[in-house]
Image: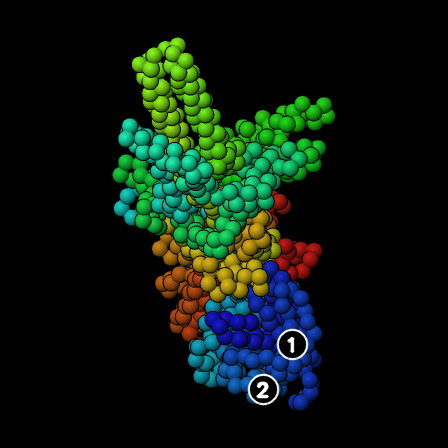
Amino acid sequence: METQGKAVLTVFVASGGPARGVRDVLRDLSAADLVGSFVWLEDSGVSGPGARIPAAEIERGVDHAVTLQDVLASRHYDLVRLCVLVSGGADAVPVRLSTETMLAELLSSNSGGARCVRMRVLLRRPADAHANSVTAALAGWHNLLVAPEDSRGPGMGHESLTATVDPVDVGRQAAPVIAGITGLWTDIDHAPFDDEPVLPGNSLRVVRSFYRRLDTSHAEHRLHSELLEFDGQLPLPRDAGTAVLYVDDVPGATRQMAQAVWKKHGHLLISARVTAPPKREQRAITLLDALKMTGRFLLAVLKNAPSVLFDRVVFRASASMASAAQRALFGSSPAAYNVVVGGVDGDGNRVSWTAYEAASRQIGAALDEGKGTTQPAPDLSALWRDYVRGALTLADASERSAGLPPVQVGAHRAVLRSAADIVPGPGDDFTDIPGVVSATTETHVAEAPDLLGIEQFRTELQGLEHDPVIGLDARRTGAAVKAWAGRRRHSYAVAFGSMLTARLGADISEASTLLSRMKSMEALRDPAEEAADVQKRMFRRVHIATLISVLIGVVAGVLAWKDVISWWWGGPIIALCVLGWGVAVTFICQRSQQYLESMLAEREAATAAHEADRVNLRAALREIEVLTGAYRQYLSWSRALGAFLARPLGVPEHELTIHRRVEWGLPRHSAIGSGNPDDGKIARVADQLRQDLFTVGWLTEPWDTVSSKAGVALGGSARDVEREPSLLATKAGAGSGSPLDEWSSMFYRGQVQSTGAAVIWQRAMGELTGPRTDLARDLLDVIEFRVDGTVRRAGVDEFLAGVGQPTEGGFFDRAAFTDTATMRGASAVVGEVPTLNRVGCGLVAVTTQYTEGISAEDLAQPALHTGAPRELPEVPDIAMRPAQREELPAHRPGTGSYAAPVVDGINF
């Protein structure tokens, strides 16, 4: 009972008879949701003043027993309409004047100041016998006579209605007219007498009303599905000035965008490396240096302190070995070492990529032991914002970030056809895994962006191929996974994930190499021991040279003393022995010094390389931590994006409003039709609407809306994200239980959805009811409606027949007026109120026409037969033909004489 934001109460008062047919038809129309609720009173139930007045409130075809006082006291109304139905006929029992007066005063005084419109509707046909007790018109009321005619539309020919007291016939003809003049039709504000001044005196008007409802709910439902359900295929957006094309080279487009994102943000994932200094050039020893060293050696020998010579070498070589760090590194984390170097766990099984994160953290902690500082993890929020922007740009060709331009095909922007080519969604997962394989591998689903998970799954399947029980299933599953992954490898998400995993694999290999090389440093001999060995070898050689020289000198001296040889030979021989001894000792010392210098240079180079390896290992381990964390975030953002792009507008929910179809009972002046366009027409209209609705950048609003509500969807676990949605990009990824992990998982499972469908549909309906009404008419090229149970098809203009549009002039059925009134022009249409309202793509149209004010004497009276019948004089020149009624086939309803159906009122 609300019209244009006003609360309206409509009260009917009748006294039985044909008026009850009006009540039954209005109830049936209410059940079809065609008229609003109203209150019905029987004159017989109205007692004296102050008594409670029983009534029936009829809403959606159901009667609710109420009292008029309760209705007035429980609600607020802005407008109250009181309509008294005055039945014609000789046996009619009119509503008591006291009842009319009392109800008018009650509604005016007890409705809280609501304006009261009083109408008296006379249900009388020209041939009806009139009761003297019926008052046709009362002063101060809108006195209206329902025109006794039936016509398809204003200005068209009509059928005169004959006299009847059948409530069904009276109701089916008069009820739609009464609904029109009392503003009961739903979805339209048409109440022509609410603001019309009351005629003076006892004047009355003859009225008629035409009604058309064009129901397009089924067509709209089909259009809604065609327009908003993409089924993974993205619409081609419209760009101002130029056309947007579809990309044919999908791998090239996705790889280009992924490389652009990596180039812009890859530095966030990479740590700096250092290079070991080159090996020091071996210093050449001159003869003078050797002589000096020999002198020092002899002096050291004399002082019995030969080890002093080697202290400098040993100290320089051993001080930089960091043996304590070596023991901490390889002593406290052997399991982590095995994971990074061999890729196996303590049981010899291949480890998951998630194990590298913990192993790198453990080894890194051993390397940082004693330093007291750790480097914070980098902020990758800018990377993931651009990762999302890149995916959206591939879908709607809008440049959202510097360095990430849309794909160009010639001079035109281009987008990808399929959402799966950008980020595969939940519908693209691999789920065809036999139960026994799934239970053995503990893998129930494979997601296309999870490259490491897929590789691990395939490795496990390869290990099961020789199993006698599940080997066949494992081989089949492995082949299916390989084919499935091959179809998804060209997507944007997989292209970016490949870069991420390639870098992670390179870092793991680098860390493995560095750890192995550092491990080999433990096998190097201690410099002090090696220097001691050199010292022993040198002393042994000096002892041998001295012994030989002394032995030869003694032999030469003895021989000369015994005169075996002369001193001229013995003296030079002794001198040569001393000289040879000096040369030999000098050569031995020189070689030992050169060896120690070479060993020192090699150890210094090894120490420098070891330090560089430690720095690079820490950088590689830090990268592994960062990359594994980034991979988790990549999985979470890919899940959210995949679910979003699969349904960027969410699940389009469109409730199909099904009105009960009126199969029989409506007169010609009222009709209900439905648009029934073919599928091709629906597709063409949807395509035209997409060009207006889906412009470049159309995905920005729905994505921003759903991502900004992530904190609301998560509830109390993400208050910070609820306050600041941008913090979502800083959270940890898959498997961490963070807000990002939970939100993306909810999005992937469908617990969180985009809500853009309702907004787009509202815009589409705005286009169809506004600037693109031509498209709406394309949906209405064929209208189906029923006339007395027979289905007819016509165009929208033929169906409307001018209802809801202004017309020029016209006349009412002259049989309702006296000849004098007709000659005076009283049957002419002097007032017309056409109203047309769009309801979706359909419409509701009502036109009410009425005459000028006339008196009751201007209405035609039934012929009175008193006394003997009068004979008509014969006219011999003109042969009189008896009236004949055309017999029509029985299967054409409505074309023969009227026969009431078995069930009273409107039939559905």
**Residue 411 x %, y %:** 26, 39
Q: Quadrant of residue 46?
A: bottom right
The span from disc 1 to disc 2 (Cα, nearest Å) is 17 Å
Residue 813 shows up from this direction: no
Q: Residues within 10 Å of mark 2 (few under 14, many from 20)?
A: few
Q: Is residue 113 visible?
A: yes
Task: Compare residues 563 and 724 and report the one nearer the observer.
Answer: 563
The residue that label 1 is drawn on is 41
Residue at the image point whose x is 70% and y is 27% from the top: 470
**Label placed on residue 110:** 2
Image x and y of residue 128, in percent? 59, 69
Name the residue type under label 1: Leu
Q: Residue at x 50, y 71 (%)?
A: 3
Q: Residue furthest right?
A: 469
* Residue positioned most to the top: 564
Secondary structure at badge 1 equals strand
> How dense is the environment of label 1, judged by Cα within 10 Å: few (below 14), some, or many (20 and up)?
many
Q: Residue at x 38, y 31 (%)?
A: 593
Give the colour scheme of this rendering: rainbow
Q: In the rendered image, which quarter contains the N terminus?
A: bottom right
Q: Please state which of the two labelled residues, at mark 1 or mark 2, is closer to the viewer.
A: 2
SS class of the residue under badge 2?
Answer: helix
Q: Amino acid at mark 2?
A: Asn
Rendering coords of residue 155 (x, y %): 41, 59
Q: Residue 828, percent across and down?
A: 41, 68
| Depth order, front residue of 529/619 | 529
Give the residue drawn at x 38%, y 28%: 589
Q: Is residue 548 above or below residue 380?
A: above
| The furthest residue to the front | 562
